[in-house]
Image: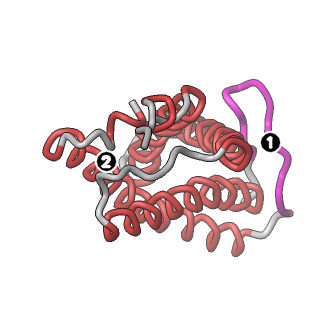
């Protein structure tokens, strides 16, 4: 029986680029979100952070739309044989959860900001249209959920990173190298 080639085992270049672009955005957006709401800042700095947070949120939403479309069109390589059945199940749950959060959170942030109402600028190039009309109570609720999900996303992302490092550094079983 023939073994899978590296091309068949690894994620495609497009999948890798999309993964790492989203990861870079998340690495920026989570600390920015925490700082902008919890640290005393000059108004101009806070506004800049908010606008960057919104911009990167829209970027994440766009990248995730492309990612989902790409995945549905081209699929993904077969699961690594290095994973135990439990690891495979946890991996599927974590990946599904990340996809849901990385789509839902930008939409919640956009809707909550729209309801405030405040603009959702995208890197100073244009503004996103409002998703909902002005409703301060709805805004408060949506942005609270957005914030709570941010903590959940952080935990799931840490689990994802820890698993990648476990496979890449400790087990050295090729699981991490499929996405690098």
Could you say where residue 8 lies in the image, as x and y percent from the top left?
51, 35
Could you say where residue 130 lies in the image, as x and y percent from the top left?
83, 52
Going 64% across and 53% down the picture, which residue do you hit? 106
Specify whether residue 120 is painted magenta: yes
* Residue at mark 2 to residue at mark 1: CA–CA distance: 32 Å
Crowd tier of the residue under label 2, counting other residues whose Cα lies within 10 Å: few below 14, some 14–19, many 20 or above: few
**Any part of residue 177 in sight:** yes
Crowd tier of the residue under label 1, counting other residues whose Cα lies within 10 Å: few below 14, some 14–19, many 20 or above: some
Q: Quadrant of the C terminus?
A: top left
Instruction: Find the magenta span and give its range.
Output: 119-132
Asked if 38 appears above or below 42 in the picture, the reply is: below
* Element assignment for label 2: helix
Between 84 and 150, the residue placed more toward the observer is 84
**Label number found at residue 99:** none
Could you say where residue 134 lies in the image, as x and y percent from the top left?
82, 64
Q: Nearer the viewer, mark 2 or mark 1?
A: 2
Going 66% across and 61% down the picture, which residue do you hit? 108
Asked if 109 appears above or below 141 in the picture, the reply is: above
Going 68% across and 67% down the picture, which residue do you hit? 139
Q: Residue furthest left?
A: 170
Residue that badge 1 annotates: 128
Between 67 and 125, the residue placed more toward the observer is 67
Q: Residue furthest front?
A: 1
Res. 112 image quadrant:
bottom right
**Label number found at residue 161:** 2
């Amino acid at each position: 029986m023939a073994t899978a080639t590296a091309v068949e085992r690894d994620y495609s270049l497009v999948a890798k680029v999309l993964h790492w672009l989203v990861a870079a955005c998340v690495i920026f957006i989570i600390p920015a979100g925490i700082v902008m709401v919890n640290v005393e800042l000059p108004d101009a700095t806070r506004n800049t952070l908010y606008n960057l947070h919104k911009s990167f949120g829209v970027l994440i939403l766009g990248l995730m739309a492309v990612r989902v479309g790409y995945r549905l069109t081209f699929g993904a390589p077969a699961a690594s044989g290095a994973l135990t059945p439990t690891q495979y199940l946890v991996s599927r749950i974590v990946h599904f959860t990340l996809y849901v959060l990385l789509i839902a959170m930008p939409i919640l942030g956009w809707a909550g900001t729209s309801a405030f109402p405040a603009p959702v600028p995208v890197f100073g190039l244009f503004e996103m249209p409002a998703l909902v009309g002005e409703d301060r109570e709805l805004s408060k609720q949506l942005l609270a959920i957005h914030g709570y999900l941010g903590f959940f996303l952080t935990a799931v992302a840490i689990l994802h990173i820890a698993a990648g490092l476990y496979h890449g550094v400790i087990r050295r079983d090729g699981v991490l190298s499929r996405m690098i």
